[in-house]
Image (cartoon, rainbow, N blue to C red):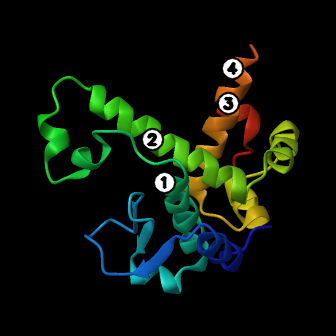
C-alpha cells in the first residue's frame, strides 16, 4: 500500500515542492504544474487519509499538466460565464486524468478489480482496505465501469457494492 510518506518521496524525486498554505474555503489542494508546486491546506495535517488522497490527486495534476483554459476556468466566477462549455469539458477531462492516476496509485487495478468482481464489499470496507476516502473509491468505481464498458460489458453500481 502506498503511504503518505511514499507520496512525499515521489514528489521530491519528481522535483515537486509541497507547501502547506491556507487555501480558499472548500479547497484542500492546488497544483501549479509550471512551477511544480503543490499547495495543501493545513487542515489536512489532522486528516491523514484525506491528505493522502488529495496529495495523490495534486501530484497527478503535476504529472499530467492541465491544458489551456483550465486555470482560467478555476478563476473566480469564470464557470458562470462560460457559454460554449468546451472549457468545462477540458477541465473535467483534466480532473479525471489526475484522479485516474491518483486512484491507480493508491488502489492498484489488480487488487481493486478483484474486489469489484467479488461484489460483496461496502464502500466503507473498501475505504478501510485501501486507507482512502469514500469519494476516492466512488471515482475509482466510475473508472472501473468506464473500462468495463469499453470492453462491451455493462456493469451497474449495485452489482459492485453491497449496501449496508
What residue do we see at 70% from left, 50% from top?
A: 104
The local secondary structure at tag 1 comes to helix
Q: Assess whether mark 2 and mark 1 are in contact (beta carbons under 8 angstroms).
A: yes
Circle on res. 94: 2
What residue do we see at 38% from left, 39% from top?
A: 67
Residue named by callout 1: 61
Question: How many C-alpha atoms fall within 10 Å of the one at disc 2: few (<14), some, or many (≥20)?
Answer: some
Q: Assess whether mark 4 and mark 3 are in contact (beta carbons under 8 angstroms).
A: yes
Look at the picture and state if 2 lies above or below 88: below
Distance Cα–Cα, label 2 vs label 4: 21 Å
Along the line of sight, the residue nearer the viewer: 14 or 77: 14
Distance Cα–Cα, label 1 vs label 2: 8 Å
Distance Cα–Cα, label 4 vs label 1: 26 Å
What residue do we see at 15% from left, 54% from top?
A: 76
Residue named by callout 4: 149
Residue 119 sits in quarter? top right
Q: Nearer the viewer, mark 2 or mark 4?
A: 2
What residue do we see at 71% from left, 68% from top?
A: 131
Circle on res. 145: 3
Give the residue furthest to the top: 152
Distance Cα–Cα, label 1 vs label 3: 23 Å
The local secondary structure at tag 2 comes to helix
Amino acid at each position: 500500500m502506498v503511504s503518505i510518506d511514499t507520496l512525499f518521496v515521489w514528489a521530491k524525486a519528481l522535483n515537486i515542492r509541497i507547501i502547506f498554505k491556507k487555501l480558499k474555503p472548500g479547497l484542500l489542494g492546488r497544483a501549479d504544474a509550471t512551477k511544480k508546486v503543490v499547495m495543501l491546506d493545513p487542515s489536512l495535517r489532522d486528516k491523514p487519509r484525506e491528505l493522502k488522497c488529495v496529495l495523490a490527486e495534486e501530484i497527478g495534476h503535476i504529472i499530467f499538466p492541465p491544458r489551456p483554459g483550465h486555470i482560467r476556468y478555476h478563476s473566480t466566477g469564470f464557470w458562470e460565464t462560460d457559454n460554449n462549455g468546451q472549457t468545462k469539458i477540458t477541465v473535467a477531462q483534466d480532473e479525471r486524468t489526475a484522479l485516474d492516476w491518483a486512484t491507480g496509485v493508491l488502489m492498484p487495478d489488480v487488487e481493486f478489480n478483484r474486489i469489484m468482481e467479488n461484489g460483496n464489499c461496502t464502500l466503507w470496507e473498501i475505504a478501510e482496505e485501501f486507507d482512502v476516502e469514500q469519494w476516492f473509491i466512488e471515482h475509482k468505481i466510475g473508472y472501473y465501469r468506464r473500462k468495463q464498458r469499453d470492453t462491451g460489458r455493462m456493469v451497474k453500481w449495485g452489482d459492485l457494492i453491497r449496501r449496508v
